[in-house]
Image (cartoon, rainbow, N blue to C red):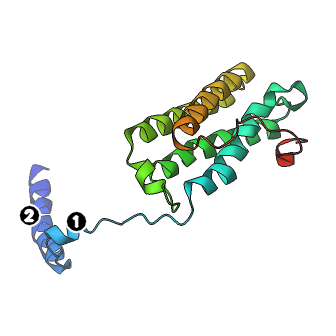
Amino acid sequence: MRSKHLWGAALAVPVLMTLSSCAPAQAPVTEKAADAAPVFHPVVSVNDVMVGVVDHNSHILWNIGDPKKAPKTEADWHNLEHASTTLAAAGSIIELGGSGPDDAKWAKDPEWTKLNQAMTNAALKAKLAVDSKNVAGVLAAGDDLVMSCEGCHAKFKPAIPAHVATKDQQPEHFGH
């Protein structure tokens, strides 16, 4: 029995050597190739991401504080999951900066990174609460989100009003 295994191995080695010689040769990696990492070119400003993504999805989380808007159905929970996941993903985008006039400078500021991470952490906390259908946990994460937003706005965009908006100012966040 042992001789059959040895005979099979003896045949396999030349076959594998022949097949490996048929494989195309790979070009050696040069320093230039290693340095040619893709470069991120933002196409929208941080402000556009904030208004179109962060603000919108934050209000979806915050609005459940109103008992009329608290999640009651699987679709409601799905919307909350989408909002919290989108907010967490937005943190990765915002950290890179955007196409606005101050965006690249902000992205290099360590405080920007810290506040952005706080926003991302709040979004992840919300997602974990949503995953366990914990309304109180979503609201607590929403409070963390407010703190990160207000901290960032205080340093980087002090002219922006508080996160609280009236129905007339942002009707898209009311009546869901």
Give me the residue at 39% from left, 43% from top.
109
Front residue of this view, candidates 61 and 72? 61
Tell me if residue 24 comes above or below residue 158 in the rendering: below
Tell me if residue 86 comes above or below residue 27 in the rendering: above
Q: What type is the residue that disc 2 sits on?
A: Ala
The image position of residue 113, as x and y in percent, is: 43, 40
Q: Secondary structure at mark 2?
A: helix
Q: Which mark is residue 35?
A: 1
Q: Quadrant of residue 48?
A: bottom right
Q: What type is the residue that disc 1 sits on?
A: Asp
The image position of residue 59, as x and y in percent, is: 75, 39
Q: Secondary structure at mark 1?
A: helix
Give me the residue at 60% from left, 26% from top.
144
Q: How many circles with numbers are drawn on the protein?
A: 2
Q: Quadrant of residue 124?
A: top right
What quarter of the picture does the C terminus occupy? Answer: top right
Mark 1 Cα within 10 Å, few/some/many (few <14, many 20+)? few
Front residue of this view, candidates 157 and 58? 157
User: Which numbered mark, 1 or 2, is in the foreground of this view?
Assistant: 1
On screen, residue 133 versus residue 14, left or right, reads right
The residue identified by callout 2 is 10
The answer to whether one can see residue 35 in this image is yes
The image position of residue 68, as x and y in percent, is: 91, 29
Q: Which mark is residue 157?
A: none
| Alpha carbon separation for disc pair 1 and 2 | 44 Å
Q: Quadrant of residue 31?
A: bottom left
Mark 2 Cα within 10 Å, few/some/many (few <14, many 20+)? few
Give me the residue at 87% from left, 47% from top.
171
The answer to whether one can see residue 123 in this image is no
Front residue of this view, candidates 171 and 154? 154
Q: N-terminal of the two: label 1 or label 2?
A: 2
